Image (cartoon, helix red, strand yellow):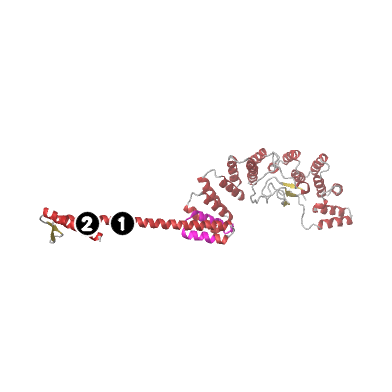
């Protein structure tokens, strides 16, 4: 009732005002709509119509603004709800993966990406899961997508590099790590992985360059020691490649650099000997190796000397070296065994028998020892003893002892090389493991080297000793 009365009152006031102002403003205004069409309006009516049109326009503009604001709010709320849903799926996916529910985790991450295909952290996690399942192609696809979304994300590039490594696309992996280093030149993880890839591909010069950069970083003392050992190995490998390519002068520089950093690094000494042999200076090579043996007492050096003297048709010289070594250490079964085997190679049957028959300790571990003794007994026509030794040799189901063994991983090898092919450590191959297998190779300061294991396909030096 009150509203009706208020409405009637307002209408009455409006009619009164309209009539009042119309009385004050008599006459009409001619309004033309075309060349022939026209109509007349009182001034008050014209003013009221103009006010009405203005009100309608203002109402329309306000209505459009309010509608646009409502649409924006709706879309924003929709995006928030979608993000919340994706967050829940991503969180559940990470929990499922941590709980080793891999299939469930994959399903949850895929649902999250179906809603938001460009979510970087979901792409990262799902790609990592596929890599853990060795599905490298799918991992690469997901991490490449993440990289397109955020091409400066270092974590994405790092994971992409790991995927490409797993897929054996090493050159592409190098490019991924190179991109990281363009963004962050001192990124240690990228430097280390790039260095390891260069080592895998035997790009030793590139690996050595990165290794120098790594050693300039503020590494903990233990890590720095391991990296210094790896630096020595890289220097040796660069020298070895130069020697193989016919550049002995460059090779000599790198071998000497390795020795300067580690005086106990035998491969570099042997490399220098190889250079002298390559230059036709076998006697100089012998002198260097003899000096090295006097300082290191390494059987590896004796083996190389043995080959050199035999190549020079001077067996008496290597016999003298062995005998002098035994005079200084008469109870050393390693020297006794190799001297006896040298006599055996030279058909010095009596001398070989006299030396080998007096060895105490290692007989039950060496198939080679029993084979040699069996042959010696046959030469002396002691057939029963020969049969006994042959039975002992044949009782070995596998080759228990070979000339060389790695003191770090116990890998056996018929040939000597500067680097173990299994654990990828340098200067660890030794001879006759019953005495030396338990003694880890040491660096210049007496501590065992610790080098990152990287698969290696190097070229061994064939120092045949049997």
Whole-number angstrom distance, CA of label 1 to CA of label 2: 17 Å
Give, as a single range, the part of the protein colored magenta: 106-135
Work out whether 140 lies above or below 306: below
Residue 64: mark: 1
Q: Earlier in the sequence, mark 1 or mark 2?
A: 2
Q: Is residue 181 visible?
A: yes
Foreground pick, 228 / 311: 228
**x 56%, y 47%: residue:** 190
Q: Is residue 67 left or right of residue 212?
A: left
Q: Nearer the viewer, residue 435 or 323?
A: 435
Crowd band around label 2 with a 10 angstrom C-alpha radius: few (<14), some (14–19), many (20+) = few
Task: Look at mark 2 in the image and give the residue it sits on.
Answer: 53
**Count of numbered marks:** 2
Q: Is residue 102 above or below residue 434?
A: below
Q: Please identify the quarter of the rendering in which residue 39 is found.
A: bottom left
Quadrant the N terminus occupies: bottom left
Percent coordinates x, y for residue 265 in the rendering: 69, 42
Q: Secondary structure at mark 2?
A: helix
Query: In what element is the residue under mark 1?
Result: helix
* In the image, residue 240 above or below residue 396: above
**Tag 1 and tag 2, C-beta contact below 8 Å:** no
> In front: 132, or 1?
1
* Residue 256: in magenta span: no
Q: Which residue is most to the front?
A: 1
Left or right: 449 with respect to 79? right
Tell me which corner region of the image, top left, top right, bottom left or bottom right, holds residue 254. top right
- Is residue 274 in sight in this rendering? no
In this rendering, would 436 be left or right of 92? right
Q: Position of residue 52 (x, y in %)?
A: 21, 56
Farthest left residue in view = 27
334 or 65, nearer to the observer? 65
């Amino acid at each position: 009732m009150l509203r009706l009365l208020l409405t009637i009152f307002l209408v009455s006031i409006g009619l009164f005002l309209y009539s009042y102002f119309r009385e004050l403003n008599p006459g009409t205004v001619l309004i033309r709509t075309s060349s022939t069409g026209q109509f007349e309006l009182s001034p008050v009516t014209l003013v009221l119509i103009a006010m009405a049109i203005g009100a309608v326009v203002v109402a329309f503009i306000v209505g459009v603004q309010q509608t646009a604001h409502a649409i924006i709010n709706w879309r924003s709320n929709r995006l928030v709800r979608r993000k919340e849903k994706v967050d829940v799926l991503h969180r559940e996916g990470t929990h499922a993966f941590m709980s080793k529910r891999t299939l469930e985790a994959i399903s949850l991450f895929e649902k999250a990406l179906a809603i938001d295909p460009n979510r970087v952290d979901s792409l990262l996690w799902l790609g990592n899961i596929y890599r853990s399942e060795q599905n490298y192609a799918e991992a690469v696809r997901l991490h490449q997508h993440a990289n397109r979304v955020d091409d400066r994300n270092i974590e994405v590039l790092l994971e992409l590099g790991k995927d490409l490594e797993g897929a054996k696309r090493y050159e592409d992996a190098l490019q991924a790590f190179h991109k990281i280093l363009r963004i962050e030149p001192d990124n240690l993880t990228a430097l280390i992985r790039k260095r390891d890839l260069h080592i895998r591909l035997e790009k030793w010069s590139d690996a050595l360059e990165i290794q120098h950069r790594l050693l300039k970083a503020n590494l903990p003392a233990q890590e720095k020691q391991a990296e210094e050992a790896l630096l020595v190995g890289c220097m040796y490998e660069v020298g070895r490649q130069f020697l193989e390519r016919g550049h002995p002068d460059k090779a000599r520089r790198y071998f000497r650099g390795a020795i300067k950093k580690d005086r106990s690094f035998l491969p570099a000494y042997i490399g220098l000997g190889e250079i002298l042999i390559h230059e036709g200076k076998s006697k100089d090579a012998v002198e260097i190796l003899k000096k090295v043996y006097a300082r290191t007492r390494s059987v590896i050096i004796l083996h190389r000397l043995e080959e050199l003297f035999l190549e020079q048709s001077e067996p008496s010289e290597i016999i003298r070296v062995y005998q002098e070594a035994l005079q200084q250490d008469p109870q050393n079964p390693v020297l006794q065994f190799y001297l006896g085997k040298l006599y055996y190679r030279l058909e010095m049957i009596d001398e070989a028998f006299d030396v080998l028959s007096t060895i105490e300790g290692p007989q039950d571990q060496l198939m080679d020892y029993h084979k040699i003794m069996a042959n010696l007994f046959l030469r002396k026509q002691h057939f029963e003893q020969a049969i006994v030794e042959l039975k002992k040799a044949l009782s070995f189901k596998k080759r228990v002892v070979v000339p060389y063994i790695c003191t770090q991983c116990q890998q056996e090898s018929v040939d000597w090389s500067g680097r173990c092919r299994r654990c990828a450590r340098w200067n660890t191959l030794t001879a006759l493991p019953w005495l030396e297998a338990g003694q880890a190779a040491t660096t210049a300061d007496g501590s065992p080297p610790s080098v990152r294991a990287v698969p290696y396909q190097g070229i061994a030096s064939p120092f045949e000793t049997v």
